[in-house]
Image (cartoon, rainbow, N blue to C red):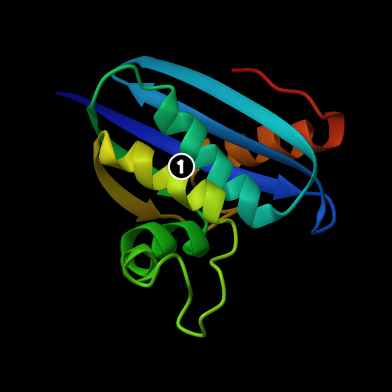
Amino acid sequence: MKSVQLITDGACIGNPGPGGWACILRYGKQHKEMFGSEPQTTNNRMELRAAVEGLRALKEPCEVEIVTDSQYVKNGITDWIHRWKRNGWKTSSKAPVVNQDLWRELDAQVGRHQTRWSWTKGHASHADNNRCDELATAAARNQNSHL
């Protein structure tokens, strides 16, 4: 099984507002940058979209370390999602889970791979996370994508 690193980030101009997501896939000496945008969205949706699209791009099951600066994404997929699924996609206060469509997509993609989630501080010393931030912010501003 191939061992891959996926670095992700999302950005939003206003929240909600125009948003962008970006990810970098690394396998050995190879890397691929991907990014996209949505005209009206939230930062959390773009953080989720980055992880979904990065995992979706993998053509076969892999061991994947996903590096994110979003505690929302990391905690959601490693902890909260188990309760949400048990409770019929409702929160502890019985409200529907926000961004449920993307959580379901992420859950399906994670199910294809062996994943390990790592958190990094945003806008700090992680070069690939900083690059993803640049790409996501540019995508949000310019409303463009590159898959």
Kindly identify which residue carries mark 1. Answer: 105
x then y, percent, for residue 24: 49, 29
Question: Farthest residue in the left direction?
Answer: 1
Q: Is residue 122 above or below residue 8?
A: below
Whether residue 125 appears in this view of the structure is: no
x then y, percent, for residue 81: 37, 63
x then y, percent, for residue 142: 85, 29
Question: Farthest residue in the bottom direction?
Answer: 93
Whether residue 3 appears in this view of the structure is: yes
x then y, percent, for residue 45: 63, 50
State the image quarter where residue 7 is shown: top left
Front residue of 89 and 109:
89
Q: Is residue 69 above or below residue 63?
A: below
Question: Farthest residue in the front direction?
Answer: 88
Can you say which quadrant of the picture contains the N terminus?
Answer: top left
Residue drawn at point x = 43 percent, y = 18 percent:
31
State the image quarter where residue 111 is shown: top left
Q: Is residue 68 above or below residue 138?
A: below
